[in-house]
Amino acid sequence: GAVVSQHPSWVICKSGTSVKIECRSLDFQATTMFWYRQFPKQSLMLMATSNEGSKATYEQGVEKDKFLINHASLTLSTLTVTSAHPEDSSFYICSVREEPQETQYFGPGTRLLVL
Amino acid sequence: GEDVEQSLFLSVREGDSSVINCTYTDSSSTYLYWYKQEPGAGLQLLTYIFSNMDMKQDQRLTVLLNKKDKHLSLRIADTQTGDSAIYFCAERPGGYQKVTFGTGTKLQVIP
């Protein structure tokens, strides 16, 4: 299966700062990557679909100016949480979909804590 | 919208079989997945099944699909302590990119 990495694995920041999370597909080129958010003891919620070379598609209720997504290459997508607040504290997980098997593989996640 | 539901908790003794159940509402679901999440980690794809299949077996894992009842199950044979984790089922309609995840079932294996 696909190997997906995320960096950093965890980050603590002050309220009002911006945090960038990287997601890399290590062994194949991914035209589409997905960003999820998971609160403690809850399921994954899709935030946005990241498309290489074009704008991301955001799910309803997700602020695109708050969560900036850049998919500049076929192996890298970044999620920037701008002006982070304590309520943005969560576990952020990226995912890539491998074709043609249609299987989806996940990164190890990034835990964000905003003080 | 799509809805995927699972029981929240399952406890089994080491060596027994575990059966984790999942129900979904979207009749157009084409791809159905089972993922495992260990504490503080991302999701690991365990197995998947296409909607035109009834069963899929992969070593200790057996997936059963009842498309009529929209019911999916994951059976883990000879459950080990290392199987303790949260298990998510997920579904995706054909032609769509969005995957909908279930609520997750926490499996506790008692030594």
Image (spheres, rainbow, N blue to C red):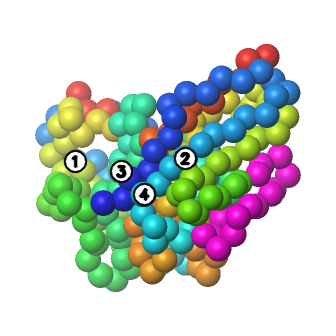
Which residue in the protein does label 3 denote? A45
- Give me the disc on residue B25: 4
- Dot 3 and dot 4 within a common chain: no
Query: Could you tell me if the residues under marks 2 and 1 are in contact, i.e. CB atoms within 8 Å?
Result: no
The quadrant holding residue A114 is top left
Which residue in the protein does label 1 denote? A18
Residue extent of the magenta highlight: B48-62
Instruction: Name the spot of residue A86 as percent of width and height, x first.
Output: 21, 32
Instruction: Name the spot of residue B93 as percent of width and height, x first.
Output: 46, 71
- Dot 2 and dot 3 within a common chain: no
Which residue in the protein does label 2 denote? B22
* C-alpha gap between disc 3 and disc 4: 17 Å
Instruction: Name the spot of residue B23 as percent of width and height, x first.
Output: 51, 50
Main secondary structure found in the magenta portion: strand
**In front here: A30 or A16?**
A30
The quadrant holding residue B38 is top right
* C-alpha gap between disc 2 and disc 4: 10 Å
Question: Of discs 3 and 1, which sits in the foreground?
Answer: 3
Q: Residues within 10 Å of mark 2 (few under 14, many from 20)?
A: many
